[in-house]
Image: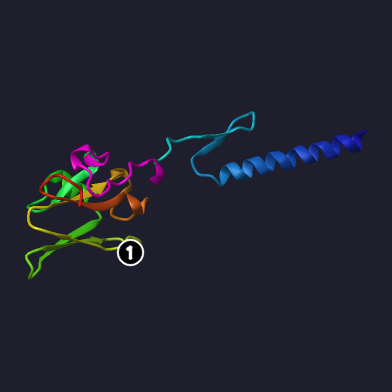
Amino acid sequence: MNKNVGILVIVLIVILGAVLWFSKSTPGTQITMMGEVTPTTQPTPTPTQFPQPPVKGEMFANSAIKSYAYEVWPGKMDAAATKATMGWTIKSTLQKNGMTLVEFIPLEQVDKKVSYTVKKGEILYFVELNPNDDTSTKDMYLTDDYGVIVGADGKVM
């Protein structure tokens, strides 16, 4: 009988140890007295929770990302656009054909430089779906920053 109790105690210790080990390896969780693992912080949105990019020909004003978009070309960016593009350098170059090449150059090497050719009368927006992820040192979601060109007719190019 004592042998069976000893084995049962060892099995319970191993199970409890495994639960504690896995809960410690997941940041932002805590373990309750019943062994349940619960989050201790609010979850950060994942890229799948962000609105989908607009499709070509869609009216930009009706797009789900409109409230996340900041005009960066033409003209001078306002304070909100400057804040949204933190972590990026915006460079524009007038081409011989009259179009403007606008480049989004990341300050972090994990992001990639993106270029847009903007015609006269078009507007280029910088889309920042998760403004809380951009700091001078880290960008959590690389797919939440992109550009959208909108034509003079208000449609996505």
Magenta span has 18?
no
The image shows residue 109 at horizontal and vertical percentages of 33, 64
Characterize the magenta stretch by its predominant secondary structure. loop
| Residue 24 location, quadrant | top right
Q: Image quadrant for the N terminus?
A: top right
Q: Residue furthest front?
A: 57
Count of number-bearing discs: 1
| Residue 21 location, quadrant | top right
Would you say 42 lies left or right of 80 here?
right
Which of these two is toward me, 10 or 50? 50
| Residue 2 location, quadrant | top right
Residue visible at 28% across and 54% down?
A: 136
Can residue 46 be seen? no
Can residue 79 be seen? yes
Q: Residue furthest right?
A: 1
Element class at badge 1: loop
Q: Residue furthest bottom?
A: 96
The image shows residue 3 at horizontal and vertical percentages of 90, 38
**Coloration mode:** rainbow
Location of residue 151 with respect to 109 vertically, above or below: above
Q: Which residue is mark 1?
A: 109
Residue visible at 27% across and 53% down?
A: 146
Instruction: Magenta stretch: give its range.
Output: 47-66
Would you say 1 lies left or right of 90 here?
right
Which of these two is toward me, 121 or 37? 121
The image shows residue 51 at horizontal and vertical percentages of 33, 41
